[in-house]
Amino acid sequence: MENAFKKAKQLIDKSKSILLACHESPDPDALGSLLAMAEYLKKRGKRFFCFVPIGIPKRLNVLPGFSKLHSKIPPTRGLDLIIGLDYGSFDRLGLNEFLNSQKMRAPILTIDHHRFGEKKGDVMILHYDASSTSEILYDFFTYVHFPINKKVAELLLPGIVTDTVSLKINATPKVFKIVADLIEKGVNFSTITSRLYRLKSLRSLKLKAKVFQNAVFYPRVSFIAARLYYKDHKNVLSDPDEINLLVEELAVLPEAKVALLLKEEEPGEWYGELRSRQGVNVGLVARQLGGGGHKGASGFHSHEKPDTIIKKVIKLLKR
C-alpha cells in the first residue's frame, strides 16, 4: 500500500484543480470519505469540486461539509485530476458523459475497497480486505502526516461504523484501534450511531411495521426476506437512503444469518438490499444476481417477480 500512497500523494501534489466523485445514492462511507478527502485538499491549498451524480441522502446532512456537495458538474477549466472514491464499478460515478466531453483527459486516482466492479485509474489504491474506504483514507492520512482533527474524524467514523454494520462485520482489531483513535479526537460515538440509524418520521416507522408484517423466515438457510411495494412507500420515503435503515432493522433477527429487503422502486422494478452475519458473503450472492457490494452488505436490481427473486437467493445460499 505504501507505494500506492506515494504515487497518490505525488499525483495530488502536482495537481491544482481536482474533481472529487463518489457513487450514486452514496452511503456514509462514500460521502464521508469524499468529504474527508476534500478537507485534505483544502489543507493542501487545492481547488476542488465535490460531485455526487444522484440521490444525495438527506439524513447525512449532519456530515461536516455536506453543503459542498453538487449533483451537476459546472464548466471546468484546467481540471488536472479526478479522484473517484468508494465506487465499486466506475459507471456508478456518473462521469462517462463528462469525460467524453473533455478535450484533455485528466488523470484518475481511484481509492476503493470494493472487490467487484470495473475500476479505472492512473493510480489506484485498492484494499479489498479493508472494512471501508474510510479506513483506507485513515491510513493514507497517516502516511502523508495529515493531522486528523475532530471534523475529519466525524467524516471517517460513519463510514467505518456503517460498512461494518456497527462493528459487527469485518471489524478487525485494527478497525477497533482506528475507531478508538477517532473517538479520542472528540467524536461522540453514541451521537454518530443514533444519527445514522434513526428513522426520523412517524410515516417511516409505520413503513417499518409493514416490512415486518410481511417478513418471512426460511429456517433451512437461516434467511429472512421482506418486500416493500411501490404503492406503500411512494409518498413516505422522502430520503431514499432510509431503505438502508429498514434492512438493518430486518437483519437483527438472531436466527437469521442473511436478510433481504426487496423495494419496488417503480412498478415492476425491484432493488434488493442484502445484509449478513456470521461470515456469509452476500457480496457474492448479489454479484450472481447482477449487483455487487461487500461481504456483509450488498445490493442488486431485478425486473423479476419478488417470489422468483427470493427463490434465486435461497438457491444461491444453499451452495
Image: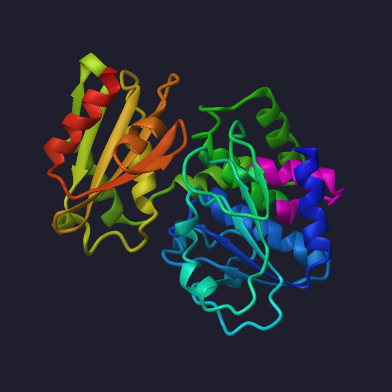
Seen in the image, is 317 located left or right of residue 96?
left
Seen in the image, is 88 located left or right of residue 308?
right
Q: Name above or below for residue 25 compared with residue 133.
A: below
Res 185 seen here: no
* Residue sitting at x 83%, y 56%: 10
* Residue sitting at x 19%, y 37%: 309
User: Residue 181 in magenta?
Assistant: no
Q: Name above or below for residue 45 compared with residue 150.
A: below
Q: Name above or below for residue 67 compared with residue 273.
A: below
Quadrant the C terminus occupies: top left
Quadrant the N terminus occupies: top right
* Residue sitting at x 67%, y 83%: 77
Residue placed most toward the observer, 98 or 43: 98
Seen in the image, is 225 located left or right of residue 16?
left
Q: Which residues are magenta?
A: 135-152
Residue placed most toward the observer, 191 or 132: 132
User: Residue 138 in magenta?
Assistant: yes
**Count of numbered circles on the image:** 0
- The residue lying furthest to the top in this view is 220
Q: Quadrant of residue 308?
A: top left
Q: Position of residue 219 (x, y in %)?
A: 22, 16
Res 169 seen here: yes
**What's the magenta bit mostly, secondary-structure-wise?**
helix
Q: Position of residue 231 (x, y in %)?
A: 14, 58
Q: Position of residue 29 (x, y in %)?
A: 56, 48
Q: Quadrant of residue 232?
A: bottom left
